[in-house]
Image (cartoon, grey):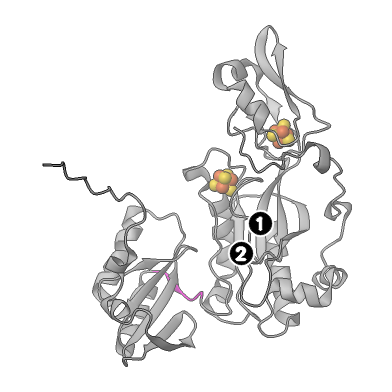
Amino acid sequence: MPQEMRSPIESGCPDGFQYMHPTMRRNYGLWSHHDHPRPGVLVHYAHSGDEIWTVKCATQRILDVFTLRKLCQIGDDFADGYIHFTIRSNVEYVVDSEDKVQPLIDAIEEAGFIVGGTANSVATLSHTQGWLHCDIPGTDASGVVKSMMDELIDEFKECNMPNRVHMTTSCCQINCGGQGDIAINVQHTKPPRIDHTQVGNVCERPSVVARCPVAAIRPAMVDGKPSLEVDEKKCICCGACFPPCPPMQINDAEHSKLAIWVGGNHSNARGKPTFQRLVAAGVPNNPPRWPEATAIVKKILNTYKADAKDWERINDWIERIGWPKFFEKTGLPFTKYHIDNWRGSRNSLNASTHIRF
Ligand code: SF4
Ligand code: SF4
């Protein structure tokens, strides 16, 4: 008898249906319309006459077990036992009738969480894993997020913006995090400092040489030991060499700064994607509250709120008024750092689609 083939082991994303509220599952694909009765609350009406009420609240994203249990307990007690996390680290509770909404909101607020983040509000800032999971961070992105959201709490709770505002942070200069209406990204401003006593013990030198996008790293012998050297004229201070070789230290309390970019947006049914543009460079990376970066972000948001037409995203608004007016209205200085005059890209930038490690 032929041997039965074994069924494949599912190791990908689990089936989302099992986590859905039964009313949501029953009406899947059969919704009629939705409404936004108040900030933080959405209601969806199904053709069958069923309703789903969604209440959204913010978390600090990096959650301890105690807080997670507290959030789940609220779900068990007030939201039919269901809880969803959104990609911006918010929590959504779903109930099937209006009379369950207010007790749910009261329980959320009593536990210290904030309801909001829907429609034309400032959504929770997103940030990348940073110190918790990653080997490259140049700053504490979670700290930047916490400080800024503390100051923007009213913009999260109310819907006063012309359209939705997504903000992102990133804790290094090269990878995730930098795509949003406003992005706060790390900016290194000096080449790495090399600890030559460690390079030979810790780093695989060919991988480090291959990492550099502008071919600025060469193998070298220093004090009779194998090490590396950096051509500082070529180095663009990107920090890509630090993860495969921690002795190439680039994080620096004084020289690692923040930069603020605006206008990044994904494509949608009406428009093409737009790239972010640098609007403030060399902003102090100043923990624990980052007041300088927060002041710039608030200035941009307040100008956008006062000047944009209804439903214009930040990139639409700037497109309409033009960049000179953007700098004029926000009062941000336009400096030489805003001009992209780097001529090395054609010849030396690693622009191939092949990943080389
Ligand atoms: S932004 Fe950079 S440092 Fe932060 S998690 Fe992503 S890759 Fe790591
Ligand atoms: S910081 Fe970037 S450009 Fe400079 S040496 Fe390292 S990888 Fe190359």
- Say left or right for 234 vs 6: right
Query: Given the image, on which type of amino acid does mark 2 rest?
Result: Met
Q: Confirm whether the magenta stretch covers residue 213.
A: no
Pick the front one: 104 or 80: 80
Task: Kindly identify the residue that appears in the image at 69 percent across and 58 percent down.
Answer: 293
Image: magenta residue range: 112-117
Task: Kindly identify the residue that appears in the image at 87 percent across and 69 percent down.
Answer: 324
Query: Given the image, on which type of amino acid does mark 1 rest?
Result: Ile
Residue 341, labelled with which disc?
none
Instruction: Residue under label 1, please give it.
Output: 184
Specify whether residue 188 is in view: yes
- Disc 2 is placed on an element classified as strand
Prevalent SS, magenta region = loop
Mark 2 touches mark 1? (CB < 8 Å)? yes
Where residue 16 appears, as percent x and y from the top left, is: 33, 65
Instruction: Residue under label 2, please give it.
Output: 167
Toward which corner of the image does residue 346 lie, by quadrant? top right
- Say left or right for 101 vs 146: left
Circle 2 packing at 10 Å, graded few (<14), some (14-19), many (20+), is: many
Residue ranking furthest to the left: 1
Q: Is residue 35 above or below residue 85?
A: below
Is tag 2's residue or tag 1's residue first in the polypeptide sequence? 2
Task: Kindly identify the residue that appears in the image at 65 percent across and 33 percent down.
Answer: 211
